[in-house]
Amino acid sequence: MNLYRLNLNLLPGLKALLDTQSVSLAAKQMHVTQSAMSRTLAQLREALNDPILVRQGNRIFLSEKALALKDDVNRVVTEASTIFENQQFDPWITEKNFTIAGTYIVLEQILPQILHQFWKQAPNFNFELLQFSPQLDKKLEAGQVDLVLGYVGKPPSGFSYAPLMEDTICALVNEDHPIGESAISVEDLEHYSVIRHSSWMGSPHFIRDYLEGLSENIRVAAKTPNLPIGLQLVKDTNHILVTMEKAAQSNIYVQNMNMKALPGKPPKVKYYVVWPEYWEHNRAHRWFREFIINRFRLKLKEMDRQNALRNDEVGITAQ
């Protein structure tokens, strides 16, 4: 096919249709009328000899060819826009929209302060923040998430990554729990049952696998998507909340909780920052992600210092 006869202006419209699976939403994303987007869809159907959007009952789905094209279209459109953006990138005047995914604690306790600093240098960047959920993996695969803060394990092909931190799991119990000052045993986990923090991206089952490796008789009374909900569930009960150590150290939600080590060999977990590979050389995304990653690491160091000071104070008081 002759390149000069191709209507490359259709590519952004194709990307919008693939991302939204909707003519009206694609029109809104492209800032055009719905009738204009319908004409674009008609041209794309003719050019690709494919319906692209297929109605099944009351829902619209992507055709098999559209699904197969999606990754390539994302990459081509992003790389094409990168050519022009990189020539004139200035964070003060650049307008960009990025989607960031993270845990509840990242979104509530860490990211707001970082974005306040970010907007002082790049006031026209806009963000959509998404909390980790089982559905988020599909959004990441579909190219609908631009930066993940706290992906567990290294991501699959097609994504770039940078190490963020290491962590392990621990237990939180009420300070008047019958266990008292004793260490938690496997028998305790079996007897008192567990509230399990369970919403992660990447390798989401490491807590489940750890508990099942300890005993088949550990009952999981509830699975929770974030720490605050888990704390409310374990509050005023004798259940044991199993969560991440750094999350437990950041508990500002429920007072009078004791953090305890878990039996056996709790897993060590590596977290990464992850982004789609096609953003790798885009100057706007590179500037954005490096700013976020650097400030995030500084915030983690600050939190570690604060936790160390608190532990020292507890040790002095105990003496």
Image: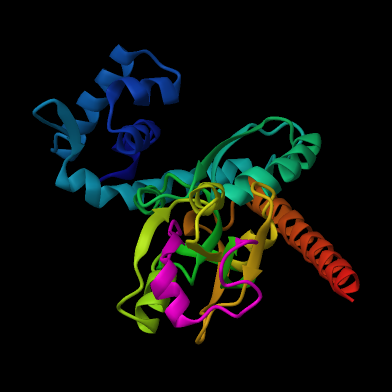
How is the structure coloured here?
rainbow
Q: Is residue 202 above or below residue 110?
A: below
Residue 7's spot in the image, x, y percent? 33, 33
Residue at image location 49% in from the left, 59% down from the top: 277
Q: Nearer the viewer, residue 62 or 247?
A: 247
Q: Does residue 206 appear in this view?
A: no
Residue at image location 61% in from the left, 50% down from the top: 105
Q: Residue furthest left?
A: 57
Q: Is residue 282 left or right of residue 58?
A: right
Q: Which residues are magenta?
A: 174-202
Residue 13's spot in the image, x, y percent? 36, 30
Q: Is residue 184 magenta?
A: yes
**Image quadrant in which you'd find residue 116:** top right
Q: Is residue 64 magenta?
A: no
Q: Is residue 311 left or right of residue 208?
A: right
Figure quadrant of the C terminus: bottom right
Q: Does residue 239 appear in this view?
A: yes
Residue at image location 39% in from the left, 56% down from the top: 223
Residue 54's spot in the image, x, y percent? 14, 33
Q: Nearer the viewer, residue 266 or 26?
A: 266
Q: Is residue 53 left or right of residue 308?
A: left
**Image quadrant in which you'd find residue 62:** top left
- Number of labels in the image equals 0
Q: Is residue 248 above or below residue 79?
A: below
Q: Is residue 7 left or right of residue 204?
A: left
Residue at image location 32% in from the left, 14% down from the top: 34
Residue 234's spot in the image, x, y percent? 51, 54
